[in-house]
Image (cartoon, coloured by chain):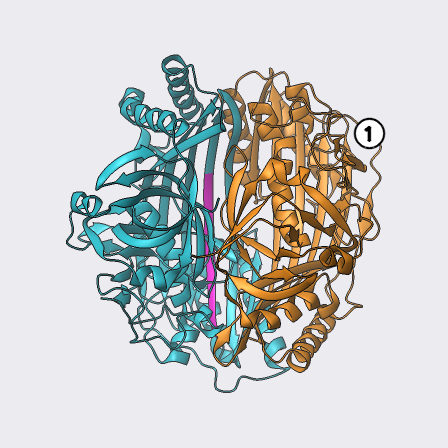
Chain colours: A cyan, B orange
């Protein structure tokens, strides 16, 4: 590992001489991906990506440089090149009033590694094979099954020219089982994922038999879905489960409140202190701790050295705040609350959500179901998109009919779509139970980014299906 | 730069063999990227990255392992070889694992070998001015002009040695249009070029997309239901085709979930559709010299007049399934143009939909899909009539390609693919009511 402290003095001097705000970051991403497809090892990836990068700001322009072989020499080169790049742009035009919000934080160090010894690939593969064999023996009628173990540990060490010295390590690990059953409608699939903050050994180093109940659940849902019905297309009263609601709100509302996208004309532009949702909706992006517990993607200090604080985006239906980086915070004259994050050493920090939560309300889920005469209970977000106008569409992996206040037949794959603020304004009930999504969600915005997503169940009106 | 030499790879392969492997393969990809970024119609960032990716592969008693790292120091490489041993020892014996044999793959080099910063800045400045002057309602959310140079080396103990360098420029833009507080839907456009001779606005379909964006400000929700023909724009067709072509590739064919396992030389699409892969087409800025598994890339025909002519399997996928290996990695698509020009393609439609872009999820395993039509218009009496929003288009992936009734003579080339507009029956569009 490159020790940035050995460069601290030189870095401070260089940025001081040129009076240019600069960052230097060493980062290592370690990824493990093991996939067993119908009993065959399909993917066995053990990938470590590490490098050093620097970013500099002058005259309203950023320069950035990175190298994948971190050494003292390459680190010094990144600082020089990032300054040169910033000056190249600044020398050709000038945003004279552009400035940055500055921070006084100092030194911070935090690792979420548990210290449990890592386990060899061979053992994890045996683990997957054992579970796969149990699935085949118990459920020979399946057309195919896929088991995936995935982990990502991100270690970052950041120095900034205004004195921050931040060193963090955040791991996360997930396990997905997918099953496919052949039906008269073609192959029907169902999958589920478990995991969260921590490494593989923190979550899954238990007796394989302890996964039996989960496997049974996945199989039962696959079978029920195989006999499922298609949702009737059109606007419906629905309940969105926490995993689905959390991801839809993250994509369709959260991004619109990121200050860089606000500047680019998102639907949240000029909506501060305006009603954008039902008064039952409060949306908060938590930094690292919710209700006394660590969030799935804890951020204590961001990649610009800004201390991370919770950001209330919507409070009782009113848009309260955007999410900022140093640059947009200065522009909007708001306090930066630690949203700038980069995925790899070669990426520049962008405004990103951390752990976005639709806060729980007071309704009981049973009462919410009883309140719907003819609608759907929808779960599990699949692939989807939302744009800055707030129009969204998401695949829905499973769900149930609700008829006369009771859960009915299982649905085959369907989708939901609508305009985000319209859908949030239609919310009439929010459950008192809250869940984190456990699918290991990655958000995409120029770069990938692991994020935490959570929600209560919400009752709203949304367009279901399309056919 | 000692590592960018085949001798370095040979020494590393020897190290892998010394660790107990029967066969070894080493590849190194060195990439330089320079990116000039515009946010909100003004320059914001100049970024350069330099990276190496080393992939170690080995076969030991029929067991295959692979490890990827981006460090070239001795300790990292030693750790990489140890991880490779661990990976192979954990893998099952798989007779389908093998490396590409020794073959004549000439050293190739294409594209500019260094980025032209000043010219990049001039081109972007001119692009910003062109958009401001010609399309004042257009709001450029982001424009990324990138220079990308990739040098790829590969050596294996079968005697294979390849060394190629490919460089090109890529321009990607996200934008919308705004008038009196009302905005169009966001749209994207991207293209590749081997030099900066042409103004950025003329790359790929960018000018057409920005012009359309201005019309889309007047968008209104679509009401009702439409079962008429749908004209699919090249970018949207590419998205659908990507899902469809997945059924010709390793994952689906090996797992037995491909729709087309037994369809070689049989009809799988409308006779109007012909798709070829042309990895060395000189018209493309992004070409392919070798496949992802080390074979020299050659052209292939995937669909000829609706008949499936090739699968798109890797060497491993081919051995695993007993089907033929693809001649390339399948990225440089050329879809044949049809007999109708675009005006006539629209002109024949009394009432229909022009599908500019798709938004939404993946098709289900059985091919059923429902997506939001973005940047889309109603077609009435042969003309593109008015922009619409909140319209869901549904259909079945496998039926769509069979339902193509016409293909445009005009085609859009983005420097890596060439794709026409197609007219399709059998999809349903439903508005919000």
Kindly report the secondary structure that dominates the magenta region of the rendered protein.
strand
Spot occupied by residue A76 in the image (x, y as percentages of width and height):
55, 63
Residue at point 36%, 48% (across, down): A170
Spot occupied by residue B10 in the image (x, y as percentages of width and height):
71, 33
**Residue B90 horizontal side relative to residue A365, left or right:** right
**Along the viewing direction, whichever of A138 and B95 lies nearer the viewer:** A138
Residue A3 seen in the current view = no
Residue A294, above or below A330: above
Picture quadrant where residue A93 is located = bottom right
Residue at point 65%, 52% (across, down): B232
Residue at point 35%, 75% (across, down): A271
Residue of label 1 = B103
**Residue A198 horizontal side relative to residue B303, left or right:** left
Q: Residues within 10 Å of mark 1 (few under 14, many from 20)?
A: some
Spot occupied by residue A353 in the image (x, y as percentages of width and height):
37, 59
Q: Which residues fall within the magenta stretch? A: A21-31
**Residue B88 horizontal side relative to residue B284, left or right:** left
**Along the viewing direction, whichever of A443 and A163 lies nearer the viewer:** A443
Q: Chain of mark 1?
A: B
Residue B149, above or below A408: below
Picture quadrant where residue A282 is located = bottom left
Secondary structure type for disc 1: loop
Residue A25 magenta-drawn?
yes
Picture quadrant where residue B374 is located = bottom right
Residue B311 magenta-drawn?
no
Q: How many marks?
A: 1
Residue A277 seen in the current view = yes
Spot occupied by residue B93 in the image (x, y as percentages of width and height):
56, 15
């Amino acid at each position: 590992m490159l020790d940035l402290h050995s460069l601290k003095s030189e870095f401070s001097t260089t940025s001081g001489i040129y009076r240019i705000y600069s960052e230097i970051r060493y980062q290592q991403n370690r990824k493990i991906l093991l996939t067993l497809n119908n009993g065959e090892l399909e993917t066995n990836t053990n990938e470590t990506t590490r490098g050093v990068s620097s970013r500099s700001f002058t005259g309203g322009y950023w320069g950035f440089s990175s190298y994948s072989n971190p050494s003292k020499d390459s680190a010094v080169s990144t600082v020089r090149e990032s300054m040169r790049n910033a000056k190249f742009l600044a020398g050709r035009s000038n945003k004279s009033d552009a400035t940055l919000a500055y921070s006084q934080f100092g030194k911070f160090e935090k690792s979420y590694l548990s210290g449990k010894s890592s386990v060899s690939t061979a053992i994890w593969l045996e683990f997957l094979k054992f579970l796969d064999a149990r699935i085949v023996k118990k459920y020979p009628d399946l057309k195919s099954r896929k088991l995936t173990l995935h982990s990502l540990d991100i270690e970052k060490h950041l120095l900034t020219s205004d004195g921050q010295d931040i060193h963090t390590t955040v791991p996360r690990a997930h396990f997905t089982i997918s099953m496919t059953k052949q039906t008269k409608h073609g192959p029907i699939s169902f999958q589920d994922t478990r995991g969260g903050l921590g490494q593989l050994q923190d979550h899954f180093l238990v007796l394989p038999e302890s996964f039996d109940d989960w496997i049974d659940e996945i199989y039962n849902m696959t079978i029920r879905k195989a006999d499922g019905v298609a949702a009737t297309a059109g606007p419906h009263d629905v309940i969105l489960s926490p995993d689905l609601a959390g991801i839809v709100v993250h994509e369709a509302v959260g991004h619109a409140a990121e200050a860089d996208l606000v500047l680019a004309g998102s639907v949240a532009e000029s909506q501060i202190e305006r009603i954008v949702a039902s008064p039952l909706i409060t949306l908060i992006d938590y930094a690292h701790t919710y209700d006394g517990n660590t969030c799935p993607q804890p951020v204590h200090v961001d990649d610009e050295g800004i201390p991370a604080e919770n950001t209330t985006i919507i409070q009782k239906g009113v848009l309260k705040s955007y999410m900022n980086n140093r640059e947009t915070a200065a522009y909007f004259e708001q306090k930066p609350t630690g949203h700038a994050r980069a995925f790899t050493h070669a990426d520049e920090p962008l405004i990103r959500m951390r752990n976005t939560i639709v806060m729980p309300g007071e309704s009981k889920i049973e009462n919410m179901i009883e309140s719907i005469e003819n609608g759907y209970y929808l779960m599990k977000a699949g692939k989807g998109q939302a744009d800055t106008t707030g129009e969204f569409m998401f695949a829905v992996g499973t769900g149930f009919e609700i008829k006369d206040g009771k859960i009915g037949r299982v649905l085959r794959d369907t989708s939901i779509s609508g305009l985000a603020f319209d859908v949030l304004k239609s919310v009439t009930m929010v459950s008192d139970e809250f869940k984190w999504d456990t699918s290991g969600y990655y958000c995409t915005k120029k770069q990938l980014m692991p994020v935490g997503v959570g929600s209560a169940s919400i009752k709203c009106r949304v367009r279901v299906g399309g056919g | 730069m000692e590592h960018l030499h085949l001798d370095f790879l040979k020494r590393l392969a020897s190290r892998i063999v010394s660790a107990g492997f029967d066969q070894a393969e080493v590849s190194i990809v060195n990439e330089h990227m320079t990116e000039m970024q515009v946010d909100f119609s003004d320059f914001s960032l100049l970024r350069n990255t330099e990276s190496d990716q080393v992939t170690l592969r080995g076969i030991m008693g029929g067991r295959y392992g692979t490890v990827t790292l981006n460090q070239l120091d001795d300790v990292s490489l030693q750790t990489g070889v140890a991880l490779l041993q661990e990976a192979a020892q954990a893998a099952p014996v798989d007779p389908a694992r093998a490396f590409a044999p020794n073959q004549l793959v000439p050293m190739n080099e294409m594209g500019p070998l260094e980025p032209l910063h000043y010219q990049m800045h001039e081109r972007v400045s001119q692009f910003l001015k062109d958009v401001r002057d010609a399309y004042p309602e257009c709001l450029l959310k982001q424009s990324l002009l990138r220079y990308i140079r990739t040098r790829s080396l590969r050596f294996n103990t079968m005697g294979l040695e390849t060394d190629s360098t490919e460089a090109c420029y890529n321009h990607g833009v996200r934008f919308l249009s705004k008038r009196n507080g009302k905005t169009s839907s966001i749209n994207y456009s991207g293209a590749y070029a081997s030099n900066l001779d042409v103004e950025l606005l003329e790359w790929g379909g960018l000018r057409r997309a920005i012009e359309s964006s201005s019309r889309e400000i007047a968008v209104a929700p679509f009401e009702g239901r439409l079962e008429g023909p749908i004209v699919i724009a090249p970018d949207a067709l590419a998205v659908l085709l990507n899902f469809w072509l997945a059924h010709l590739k390793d994952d689906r064919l090996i797992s037995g979930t491909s729709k087309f396992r037994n369809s070689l030389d049989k009809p799988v699409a409308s006779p109007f559709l012909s798709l070829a892969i042309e990895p060395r087409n000189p018209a493309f800025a992004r070409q392919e010299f070798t496949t992802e598994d080390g074979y020299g890339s050659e052209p292939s025909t995937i669909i000829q007049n609706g008949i499936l002519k090739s699968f798109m399997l890797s060497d491993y996928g081919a051995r695993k399934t007993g089907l033929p290996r693809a001649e390339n990695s399948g990225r440089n698509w050329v879809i044949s143009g049809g007999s109708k020009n675009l005006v006539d393609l629209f002109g024949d439609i009394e009432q229909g939909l022009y599908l500019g872009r798709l938004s939404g999820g993946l098709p289900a395993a059985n091919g059923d899909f429902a997506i939001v039509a973005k940047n889309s218009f109603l077609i009435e009496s042969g003309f593109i009539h008015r922009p619409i929003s909140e319209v869901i288009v549904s259909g079945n992936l496998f039926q769509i390609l069979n339902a193509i009734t016409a293909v445009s003579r005009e085609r859009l080339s983005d420097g890596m693919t060439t794709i026409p507009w197609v007219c399709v029956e059998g999809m349903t569009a439903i508005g919000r009511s």
